[in-house]
Image: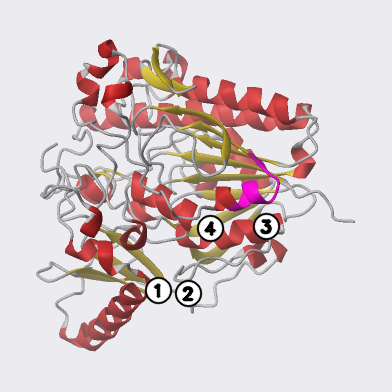
Amino acid sequence: MEHKKPNILFILTDDQGAWAMGCAGNTDIYTPNLDRLAARGVRFENFFCASPVCSPARASLLTGRIPSAHGVQDWIRSGNLDKDKMDEEIRENPYYTYEEKAIPYLDGMLTYTDVLKENGYTCALSGKWHLGDSLTPQHGFDKWFTIGRGGCYYDNADIVENGKVTFSNQYITNIITDKALSYLEEFQNQENPFYLSVHYTAPHSPWDENQHPAEYIERYRDCGFTATPDLPVHPNQIPSAPYGTGEVRKSLLRGYYAAITAMDADVGRLLDRLETLGLHEDTIVMFMSDNGINMGHHGIWGKGNGTFPFNMYDTAVKVPFLVSWPGHYASGAVTHRMCSQYDFFPTLLDMAGIKKELPEGLPGRSFADVFTGNTEDDGAVVIFDEYGPTRMIRTAEWKYICRAPYGPDELYHLYTDPEENHDLIKEPACQPLIDSLYVKLTRWFYTYADPAMDAAREGVTGFGQLCRPGIYADRREVFCRQP
């Protein structure tokens, strides 16, 4: 007799660095529920996004493809909504200036939620989608509650439910959690397993004090903010996120931390409800962010597009990842294995006990053996990242960032320089190593990129994507050229 497959609760945050949790060693931030989740599960010390910006990373999570193979190569600025199908007062909102026709960016691609649905899961989404055509439930989701675009004000979110857009002045973190809790109540007595995606907008900007509950802002009123560097603004900073020094820096960190602590409280509500409903022993809980972020690290404010050319510092490409399944997985474990979001698809299927032949050309490999005790990195894993024509290859020891054809490239020796402060790209002794890493990187992307929409040939700006790229583009300007 086949045992019931585990339920899955997947919590995804927006722009949370791997460094932004108490359990990761941050002495300023208050995250008791994330720390609680880490204490009863496995924390990944070296988990990487596929691209240091939201939509491409989310698409890679779902499809197992790299951005140069799924075609979402920048955050989606247009294609979220069909303006002709919206009420006039909403259609005229300047918030939707760039919206024209809805584009289902992942149409025709297999996602892990499609596979879960095929295998009897009820799939539900509460929170951010940001992969096109937000009004239409897609890829196996039976329940669909999202926001119209990718970001929103915390106190004036554009809620999508039942094919309609309405604005709410409640705190969006609480709205997302409330809907997720109602789904859990529905799932309590059903026979088939559930998959629930809870996708918070936190801690993405805005970080203004009036955007977050006062109790969380006040918690950080007198914080010294010593857990993050206090540096001059980077010369290549661009206005993709708020930035500043002195009191402005403290204000931005205060809002960022407040957003995380408010979200952490709602993670606690979800964990408590699982226990109250008697579901916690049958449910794998996973917590991740879509991409990392620099909050003054290296003088940069923002993720990969905090600078131009894009940056690939670990603060931007590393994300938190916590996994807990009481009675099945170890408690309080930390793994140093290097894993990527493009590994997530095959890993999740292994965790759920699903056998499925996946499409050819996926680069990921399952790391599910971490949960049976294989937590150490053998040094053989290589991680790749991309943001438009900026590409990265990272081993445990070295990181090479390639900006072909003109650079500037970068090289860091991570054993002696883990914070990436000393660029060795011009060191004569390093040239053979650089050549070797370049060859590996070039061959890997040749293997896994789709020539029809290879991001190395695209003019990705960091200011948003307007339509599908490559041969699928219906215009010359695929990527927005202004903030």
Whether residue 375 is in magenta: the answer is no
* Label 4 sits on residue: 344
Q: Residues within 10 Å of mark 2 (few under 14, many from 20)?
A: few
Cα–Cα gap, marks 1 and 4: 19 Å
Left or right side of 98 for 476: left
Q: Amino acid at mark 2?
A: Val
Residue interval drawn in magenta: 115-122
Cα–Cα gap, marks 2 and 3: 21 Å
Question: Can you say which quadrant of the picture contains the C terminus?
Answer: top left
Measuring from the top left, give residue 342's x and y in whole percent.
46, 61
Nearer-N-terminus badge (4/3): 4
Instruction: Name the residue located 51 percent from the left edge and 44 percent from the top edge.
Output: 139
Measuring from the top left, give residue 71's x and y in whole percent.
31, 55
Instruction: Name the residue located 33 percent from the left edge and 71 percent from the top edge.
Output: 393
Nearer-N-terminus badge (2/4): 4
Nearer-N-terminus badge (1/3): 3
Left or right side of 69 for 184: right
Marking on residue 395: 1
Foreground of the two, 375 or 61: 61
Cα–Cα gap, marks 4 and 3: 10 Å
Q: Residues within 10 Å of mark 1 (few under 14, many from 20)?
A: some
Marking on residue 351: 3
Measuring from the top left, give residue 160's x and y in whole percent.
44, 23
Tag 3, which secondary structure?
Answer: helix
Which quadrant would residue 252 be assigned to in this image? top left
Residue 171 in view in this figure: yes
* Label 2 sits on residue: 381
Q: Amino acid at mark 1?
A: Thr
Q: Are marks 1 and 2 in contact (CB under 8 Å)?
A: yes
